[in-house]
Amino acid sequence: MPDQPAKKPVNKSGLLITKNSERALSPAQIEFNRMMKRLENARSKLSREEARLDDYLAMTIRDIMPFIDDIHRINRDIVFLTVNAVKEIKFNKKRRRLLKDLIIERAVDLLHDSCGLDDDDLIKLEKIIEELEPPYEKNRAEKEMARDFEYMRGMLEHAARDLGIDLDVSDLTPDMDPAELESEMSERLRVAVNNAGAKPAKAPRKQTKAQLEKARKLEEQEEARKRDFKSLYKQLAKALHPDLEADPQLKQHKESWMKRLTAAYAAVDLRELLQIEMEWLGEEASNLATAGEEKLKVYCSVLKEQIADVKHQIAWLIDQPQYGLLHRFVNPVVGTLPHPDRIILGLQKSLNHLLSLKNTLQSGGDEVHGMLEQWADDRQRAESNPDCPF
C-alpha cells in the first residue's frame, strides 16, 4: 500500500502571512489574511450545516417517518371504509358526489405520497379512483394538454409574425411529448428565421475610453489569476510528479501527493494548493510572505470566488438529493426546518384524530351517517379548499 502523504501539524494561522518584526504587513497581505480567514469560516460553517442536516435526517428516519407511515396506512383504511359506507348508506345526489370527490382527492394524495403503503394498496387506490372518477374528470388531463398546446402554438405563430415569417405548424399534435413538442417548435422557428435572413444586428455602441480601460484591467486581472494559479500548480507538480522519481518507495509516496494536487487544481482550490506547498516544503508560510503584491491580489481574487462558492453550497445544501426526505418539513416561506419535537407533536395529534375517525367508521350505524354528511357539507362550504377532517 503506498504511503499516504502525512500532513504536518499546522498552526491555525499556518496559511496566514505573519507580521515581520521589521515592517508591517502590506495592504495586499492584510487582504489575503482576511480572505483566508473568511474562507476557513465559510468552510467551517458548511461542515457544521452538513453535520446538522445529517443528524436531522437520521432523527427523521428513526423518529418521524414511522409516524408518517402510520398516518398514511390509517388514511388508506379510512378511504376503504368510506368507500364501503358510501355504497351502503343512502345520500342525496349532491352529497354523494361531494363524498366521492373527497375519496378521490385523498386517494390521489396517497398515491403521490405513498410512504408506508405497499403495491397492493396502490393498486386498490388506483381502482377506486377509476371507479369513482366521473367521465369529465377522466378527460381533464387531455383537455389541459390540448389547451397548453394551442397556447404554445399561438405564441410561436405570433413570434413568427413579428419577424415577418410565415410558419406552418399545423402538423404538430398535442399528443406529442411536451419536451419534444417544445423542442420541435423552437427548432422550426430557428430554421425559419435563418432561411428568411435574420435582420443584421445593430453595431455595438462605441465604448468610452474609461470603459475600454476598465475592460483591459479586468482582462489583465483574469489572465494574471489564471497564470499565477497555474504557475503554482506547475511548480508543485514538478516537485511532486512521481514519474520524475527514481526511488520506488518515494515514487509511491509522490503518487499520493500528486492525486491530492490534481484534485485541488481541478477544483480551483487555491487554499489547498497553498496547503500542499506549505506541507511539502515545510516552510510554513514563507513563500506567501515573499510573494509580490500583484500575486497576492490574484490569490485574493481566487479566494473570493471560493468563498462565494462555499456560501452558495451552504444556501442550497438542504436542496441536495441526499436530504430529499427533509423537503416535506421545510417552511415554504423562510426555508427553515422546525424542531423535530414540534413535528412529532403535530404528527401525534394527527394520528390520534385519524384513529378516532377510523374507529367511528368501523363502528357503523347512525354516527357514521352523520359524520359523512358533515364531511360533505364542509366540502360544499369550502370546495376550493376543503376543510376535510381526513
Image: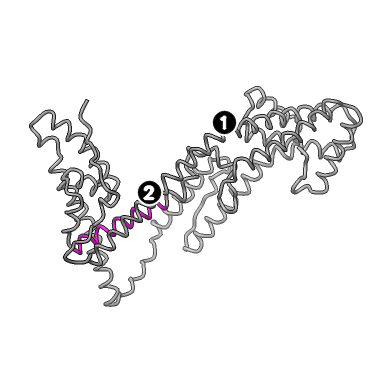
Indicate how the structure is coloured in the image: one colour
Task: Determine the image quadrant of residue 121.
Answer: top right
307 falls in the magenta region:
yes
368 relative position to 164: left or right: right
* For the residues bearing labels 2 and 1, Cβ distance under 8 angstroms: no
22 relative position to 185: left or right: left
Image position, residue 325 (x, y; %): 55, 37
The residue carrying mark 1 is 62
Image quadrant occupied by the C terminus: top right
- Mark 1 secondary-structure assignment: helix
The residue carrying mark 2 is 43
Image position, residue 11 (x, y; %): 27, 48
Principal SS element in the magenta part?
helix
Q: Nearer the viewer, residue 282 or 111?
A: 282
The tally of labels here is: 2
Amino acid type, residue under disc 1 in the picture: Arg
* As drawn, 39 above or below 71: below
Q: Residue at x 15, y 40 (%)?
A: 240
Q: Which of marks 1 and 2 precedes in the sequence?
A: 2
* As drawn, 94 above or below 308: above
Task: Determine the image quadrant of residue 224.
Answer: bottom left
Image position, residue 39 (x, y; %): 34, 53
* As drawn, 115 above or below 40: above
